[in-house]
Amino acid sequence: MFGINGSEFLILLIIGVIVIGPSRLPEYTRKLTNLVKELRRMASGAREQIKEEVGIDIDEVDWKKYDPRQYDPRRIIKEALLDDDTKPVSDGAPVAVAAVDTPTKAPERVVERLSVGEKAPFDAEAT
């Protein structure tokens, strides 16, 4: 409860009795109990409203699934890059799959160069 252990709570209680005074202590105790009751009523009302609108009970929700701390971008990218997708994509025709041990040669990249004095093409929609 708020990170307060028993001895700290007892010290706070003694300080509260000294500051408030024994004459006003029952009044403040009543106010505190009414505040706690009102907060509980509001929490249960919010719970019922969520259950009514969403259609699920809050206790049934797996909150760990929505914890943003579990989504490490580095881990997600690493898993995506190392993911071995061995299923070949085909349109129904048989596909020849290369053996795993045979290295494949990457296609050479063709770079088109402008001749000296030639202006670069201009695309009005790209700017």
Image (spheres, rainbow, N blue to C red):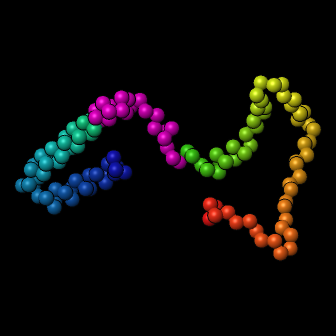
- Where residue 30 appears, as percent x and y from the top left, is 12, 46
Residue 67 sits above or below residue 97 on the image:
below
Region rendered in magenta: 47-69
Residue placed at 76% from the left, 68% from the top?
120
Q: Residue furthest left?
A: 23
In this picture, residue 117 sits left or right of residue 40: right
Question: Does residue 40 appear anywhere in the picture?
Answer: no
- Where residue 85 appears, as percent x and y from the top left, is 75, 35
Residue placed at 62% from the left, 60% from the top?
125
Residue 89 sits above or below residue 82 on the image:
above
Would you identify the image quadrant in which residue 81 lies? top right
Residue placed at 85% from the left, 60% from the top?
111
In this picture, residue 110 sits left or right of residue 54: right
Residue 61 sits above or below residue 79 on the image:
above
Residue placed at 89% from the left, 33% from the top?
98
- Where residue 23 appears, as percent x and y from the top left, is 6, 55
Q: Residue furthest bottom?
A: 117
Indicate the quadrant containing the C terminus: top left, top right, bottom left or bottom right.
bottom right
How many marks overall? 0
| Residue 107 is covered by the magenta coloring | no
The one of 100 and 27 positioned closer to us in this rendering = 100
In this picture, residue 60 sits left or right of residue 28: right
Question: Does residue 118 appear anywhere in the picture?
Answer: yes
Q: Residue furthest right?
A: 102
Would you identify the image quadrant in which residue 33 lies? top left
The one of 104 and 52 positioned closer to us in this rendering = 104
| Residue 56 is covered by the magenta coloring | yes
Q: Main secondary structure of the magenta part?
A: helix
Would you identify the image quadrant in which residue 115 lies? bottom right
- Where residue 119 appears, as percent x and y from the top left, is 77, 71
